[in-house]
Image: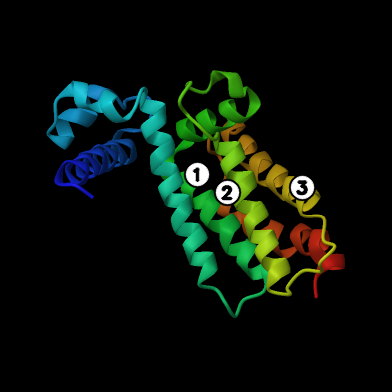
Amino acid sequence: MTIRQENALKTRQKLINSAENLLKTNGFNALCVEDITKTAGVAKGTFYVYFKHKEDIVAEICRGYFKQIENQLEQMKTHNIVEKLAVYFDSFMRAVMLYGINICREWIRGAIDPNTAPDNAGMTKWQYDVEMLKNILNNAIKNNELKKDAPVDLLTHMIISELYGMMTCWCMSDGYFEPTDWTKKFADIPLKAILERYLL
């Protein structure tokens, strides 16, 4: 990698770190490109070298968080698939709460109407979550935690629908309830029932 490429990566990461801090402090609606670049110490035009919209940088931040969850699950060698998914659900909903109700609404809007996503957004949040969950279940088959004939696509969509249902209900209630309470209940009761016939 050249020095120029290294500097470009550092600048991009500075923008991401700046946006993440502002997002946590002020929320999605108050987030603007000018504040991101000012906090990062770069010219406003620099933002557009790496991202087209503020939604793009927020998507990048969220993917980074979910990548950490994926890495955490890969380290859980001695845990069964139900325990791993319980951790995934808990971490998923903690991310929802961490980034706030307005980001959650953006995710849901993108899932309900993918045509509203920016042109360069790549994989939507919904697609990203579906692929991640499929990978978790496929790894469980490889690790002999689930039967070989487990219907991964069906299980993925049943489980992801529950998670997005929780997200949607949380948004509809304007953040009235604690999402992590529901993920624990889901892991304890419906999840076990969904996976029971496919467990080894």
Label 2 amino acid?
Answer: Pro
Q: Is residue 182 visible?
A: no
Q: CA distance from mark 1 to mark 3?
A: 19 Å
Q: Nearer the viewer, residue 176 or 60?
A: 60
Q: Residue at x 55, y 73 (%)?
A: 76
If you read the primary sequence from the N terminus, does the residue marked by circle 3 or circle 2 appear first?
A: 3
Quadrant location of the C terminus in the rendered image: bottom right
Q: Secondary structure at mark 1?
A: helix
Q: Element under label 2?
A: helix
Residue at mark 1 to residue at mark 2: CA–CA distance: 9 Å
Q: Which of pointers 3 and 2 indicates the residue nearer the eye?
A: 3
Disc 1 target residue:
96
Mark 1–mark 2 contact, CB under 8 Å? yes
Q: Residues within 10 Å of mark 1 (few under 14, many from 20)?
A: many
- The first of marks 1 and 2 along the sequence is 1
**Residue 90: percent from the left, percent from the top?**
56, 57
Image x and y of residue 25, in percent: 29, 39
Q: Which mark is residue 158?
A: 3
Kind of residue sitting beneath label 1? Val
Q: Where does residue 167 sit, x and y in percent of width and height?
A: 60, 40
**Viewed as shown, does residue 50 lie left or right of 134?**
left
Relative side of 147 to 18, left or right: right
**What numbered label is drawn on residue 51?**
none
Q: What's under tag 3, amino acid-wise?
A: Met
Which secondary structure lies at badge 3?
Answer: helix
For label 3, the crowd category at 10 Å Cα-Cα, with few meaning under 14, some 14 to 19 and many 20 or more, is: few
Look at the image and tell me whether residue 59 can be seen: yes
Q: Which mark is residue 179?
A: 2
- Separation of marks 3 and 2 at Cα, in angstroms: 18 Å
